[in-house]
Amino acid sequence: MPLSHDHIRTTVETYLARHPHEREQLGALLDALDRTGDDIASRSTFTGHVTCGAIVVDQLGRVLHVLHLASGKVLAPGGHAEPKDESLAAAALRELHEETGIPPQAVTPWPDYETVPLDIDIHDIDAHPGKSEPGHQHFDLRFLFRLNTANEVPVVLQEEEVGGIEWRLVGRVTSPTLREKLLKLPLATEPEPANASALIYNDRGEYLLHLRDYFPGQIWEPGMWSLLGGGRERQDASLEHTVRRELAEEAGLDLADLTPFGTEYASTDTGATVPIAIYASRWNGGPRELRLTEGVMLAWFTPSDLHRLRIADTTSALVRRHAASLPATRSGSKPEGERRGSSHGTVLNVIGVHLYLERPDGTVLLGLRHPDSAFAPSTWHALAGHCEQENAIACLIREAREEAGLHIERQDVELVHVVHHIDGVGDRPRMGLFFRVRTWSGEPELREPDKCTQWRFWDPAALPDDLVPYTRVAIEKIQNGELYSETGWPT
């Protein structure tokens, strides 16, 4: 079905809301939209019709241009809309692929420009007697995309229409109006996600998923299970504000703590890649308590349930990755005394082992955690891990080998400190065991770069500011010869 007048009008009016001073110069396009008998999405409407361009910016801030053989001009990829195009942005992506061979998956819509053009230009097209085409106007809507990779992408030119490609610096972009807008954008930096979602989990190892309405062509991922969330709006001061607003609007949900977990790269219906900032939070309520205003329903699922759901692969992988980062989490009901918030009965504590590795000069080893880490992202911490079905010293030896390539013998390990800590009231308590090793072999290396980005030895008297608080306490106590400490417990 051809692109509708309503879709084009909405897109143009949204653009003009950002650029109201351009309303007069886009008068011909607005007049065409007012002529209800004209299909301005059709290339056979010679009173003027829509074309769609793809403005692709690479990692160096250069803009893709192609040599259009018909006009002999060097322009951004683009062309006429077709009946199969579901949106104007999808038409731009299709033209990019057809003219250059660059697939939609290789680019990401620029945040805040997913459905709104960066620029709209009206220009005259000469008559083409050979095709029985009179002179007419093109209403060119230009959508902005970021190339996902710094590597050179394979190019397959549409030889009958394109004579070559060129990556141009912004100052050499051919269109003056486009060049003016591009110069105002930080093109050499990676764009921030413009969407945010909440990864909500409970103490039973379940995740809260949202069944979306089945409105194909109107909403993203129709009829699929997804995370609650949405796109950033202008009043949102940050992406955390975005996800909080979306939770309140969609489900009447207000979460005390939201922790950045990472970025999900989801695919739109057109095949483009969209970055989504993911915030994680623990919540032990029931879906029926919530006031759902969008979608069909909310429900809890364990990671083992996901294979039977209609769910995006990226969402499923995200849930599984998060679940793997949570120690001592099990699906199914917990004993009464183990439930979060219970103040009676036995509460199981998580056991964590920590390596206190001290060189002869007195400096101690710390690692800088990955920015996407579920716990303490971009923060220094001791080499550590959680006990599996193993004793604590065996865990320490395994973690040291797996994380840093260090080889430790059991007889060289001694317990130097225990910290009993809790993150917040009602959270699961944790027992941190700090072990010193008298001798070891190997130098610290990055064996798990997705968890730790750097190893460094620090002077205990000059520890980094961004250090996990209970680790700082433990190091200070070890220096003083104290065996035990507590942090986080209410007084």
Image (cartoon, rainbow, N blue to C red):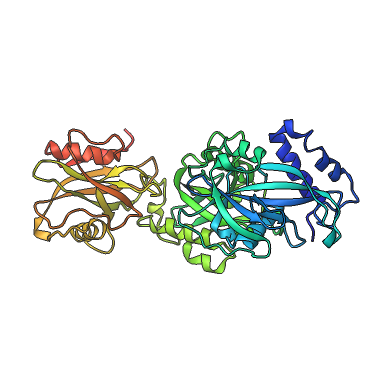
7 left or right, relative to 251: right
The extreme right residue here reads 37
Residue occupying image coordinates x 83% and y 53%: 127
Residue in front for this viewpoint, 25 or 471: 25
Residue occupying image coordinates x 83% and y 41%: 28
Q: Quadrant of residue 405?
A: bottom left
Q: Quadrant of residue 308?
A: bottom right
326 left or right, relative to 2: left
User: Can the viewer see residue 273?
Assistant: no
213 is higher (above) or lower (below) than 291: below
Q: Quadrant of residue 85?
A: bottom right
User: Can the viewer see residue 146?
Assistant: yes
How many marks do you count on the picture?
0
Residue in front for this viewpoint, 66 or 327: 66
Residue in front for this viewpoint, 29 or 137: 137
The extreme bottom residue here reads 308
The extreme top residue here reads 21
In the rendered image, the quadrant that contains the C terminus is: top left
54 left or right, relative to 398: right
Q: Position of residue 307 (x, y in %)?
A: 52, 68
343 is higher (above) or lower (below) than 445: above
Q: Position of residue 241 (x, y in %)?
A: 54, 37
In the rendered image, the quadrant that contains the N terminus is: bottom right
Q: Position of residue 305 (x, y in %)?
A: 51, 66
Q: Position of residue 373 (x, y in %)?
A: 38, 49
